[in-house]
Image (cartoon, rainbow, N blue to C red):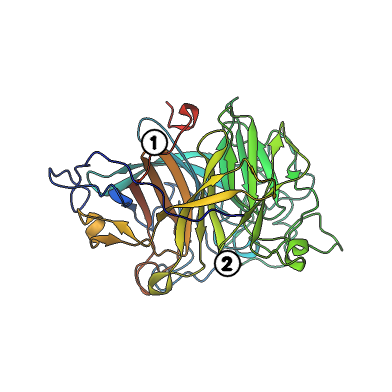
């Protein structure tokens, strides 16, 4: 069912980076162990310039009090790398739930990590998700939802009905760019797939998942949901041709749990906006684990982040697997092989000010991108304004890692960063 074993090591070229990401001449890459070769961070309190205040439904944290002076760029749940070194990053629904995220505007941003300075620059808002053509058949917060609310928090007033989508409407957790330049988002309230143009404007109604609904689904009515909240499309891969999507649930549906398959996650295939019959299964190492991200490497291999739900000193399991979707034994399951243990990364140059063994003990690690056949980038969702990853009273930042692998992966050229 699964294939567990160490990957064969290959010789790698040393990478010259120093203790804060600065260049040195002495750093050596261990060819038998994944090695941290680049690190940068974005401060937790990074806001979209001149944006509306937010967090009126939250109390904030000891590190950051609410309400907030703008729209936080906050945690990244999906990313897309470009050849110029910049990244698109997608923020999720805001502050963790439908009920407290109505004032968070769903957005995609552009950032630029600089491992030479160990700083990540915020380059601006790429676009907000919106529905100007009224494809959504139910009220959204900024057009019907707010004015119907029984009570609003002090200091907050309903915005103009501009059809910008908020964390009250959807919880996007994955993002891919199709061959035609349009964007696809996988989200968790439906769970739905959202299809937009390159400015974030919906091109069609939300696409529902056949036979799967969460308690936050706006069309649920009196029906019984079969997927827990926040267990929808945390990961969504796209084939090298840019036409086939592979959305993957973060949690097991009720029917699978009843059949003793609580550790199984479903991987669907979607072509031209339509779900194909059937699905593959990915089995986690524990039913208590969760999916962090899922991206393709080539036509049949993929990377999966599997993690525990712990942070800081309690964190134990944060891994990246190489996954084979061919299901050659016809048992309905993908095969998985450990690729990186994010709690045990070689750090000879002590990047980020950490020790020779680098750990990434954040609660949610939700972004992986392939830079070349031996290097990947990894980022965390910092769940703004959370604390706990690097200390109980330390505000979680967005950390950016470049990791040199202990094996060359066979990357399809179309899945490498493009201009």
Q: How many marks?
A: 2
| Disc 2 element | loop
**Mark 2 in CB contact with mark 1 (< 8 angstroms):** no
Q: Is residue 73 left or right of residue 142?
A: left
> In this view of the protein, which residue sits in the foreground, 3 or 387?
3
The percent position of residue 35, horizontal first and vertical second, equals 30, 50
Residue at the spot 75% in from the left edge and 59% down from the top edge: 148
Can you give x and y, in whole percent of width and height, for residue 142 in the image? 67, 50
Callout 1: helix, strand or loop?
loop
Find residue 362 and report its image quarter: bottom left
**What residue would you read off at disc 2?**
286
On screen, residue 67 versus residue 145, left or right, reads left
Q: Is residue 409 visible?
A: yes
Residue at the left extreme? 25
Q: Answer whether residue 71 is visible to the viewer in this image.
A: no
State the separation of the CA atoms marked 2 and 1.
29 Å
In this rendered view, identify the residue nearer to me: 268 or 175.
Answer: 268
Nearest the viewer among 109 and 25 is 25
- Rendering coords of residue 55 (x, y %): 52, 62
Label 1, on which residue? 373
Which quadrant of the rendered structure holds the N terminus?
bottom right
Quarter holding the C terminus? top left
Name which of mark 2 and mark 1 comes first in the sequence: 2
Mark sitting on residue 344: none
Q: Callout 1: 10 Å neighbours few (<14), some, many (20+)?
A: some
Q: Position of residue 157 (x, y in %)?
A: 61, 58
Residue 184, above or below 71: above
What crowding class fits label 2: few (fewer than 14 Cα within 10 Å), some (14-19), or many (20 or more)? few
Front in this rendered view, residue 312 or 137: 312
Taking 36 as reference, is 299 above or below it?
above
> Which residue reaches farthest right?
222
Residue 327 lies in what quarter of the image? top right
């Amino acid at each position: 069912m699964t294939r567990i074993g160490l990957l064969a090591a290959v010789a790698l070229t040393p990478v010259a980076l120093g203790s804060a990401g600065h260049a040195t001449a002495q750093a050596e890459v261990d060819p038998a162990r994944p090695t941290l070769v680049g690190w940068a961070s974005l401060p937790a309190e990074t806001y979209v310039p001149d944006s509306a205040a937010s967090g009126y439904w939250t109390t904030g944290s000891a590190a950051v009090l609410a309400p907030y002076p703008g729209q936080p760029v906050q945690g990244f749940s999906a990313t897309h790398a470009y050849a110029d070194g910049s990244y698109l990053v997608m923020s999720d629904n805001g502050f963790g739930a439908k009920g407290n995220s109505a004032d968070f505007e769903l957005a995609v941003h552009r950032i630029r990590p600089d491992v030479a300075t160990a700083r990540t620059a915020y380059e601006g808002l790429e676009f907000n998700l919106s529905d100007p053509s009224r494809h959504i058949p139910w009220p959204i917060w900024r057009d019907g939802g707010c004015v119907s609310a029984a009570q609003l928090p002090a200091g907050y007033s309903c915005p103009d009905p501009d059809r910008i989508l908020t964390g009250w409407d959807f919880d996007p957790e994955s993002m891919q760019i199709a061959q035609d330049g349009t964007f696809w988002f996988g989200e968790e309230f439906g769970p739905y797939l959202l299809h937009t143009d390159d400015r974030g404007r919906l091109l069609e109604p939300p696409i529902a998942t056949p036979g799967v609904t969460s308690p936050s689904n706006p069309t649920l009515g009196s029906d019984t949901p079969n997927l827990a909240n926040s267990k929808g499309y945390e990961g969504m891969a796209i084939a090298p041709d840019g036409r086939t999507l592979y959305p993957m649930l973060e949690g097991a549906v009720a029917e699978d749990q009843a059949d003793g398959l609580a550790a199984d996650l479903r991987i669907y295939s979607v072509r031209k906006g339509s779900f194909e019959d059937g699905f593959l299964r990915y089995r986690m190492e524990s039913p208590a684990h969760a999916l962090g991200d899922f991206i393709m490497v080539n036509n049949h291999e993929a990377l999966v982040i599997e993690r525990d739900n712990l942070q800081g000193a309690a964190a134990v399991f944060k891994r990246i697997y190489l996954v084979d979707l061919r299901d050659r034994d016809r048992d309905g399951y993908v095969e998985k092989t450990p690729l990186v243990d994010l709690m045990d990364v070689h750090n000879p140059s002590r990047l980020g000010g950490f020790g020779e063994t680098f750990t990434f003990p954040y609660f949610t690690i939700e972004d992986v991108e392939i830079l070349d056949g031996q290097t990947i980038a990894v980022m965390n969702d910092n769940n703004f304004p959370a604390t706990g990853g690097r200390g109980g009273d330390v505000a979680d930042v967005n950390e950016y890692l470049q990791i040199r692998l202990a094996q060359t992966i066979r990357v399809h050229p179309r899945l490498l960063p493009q201009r």
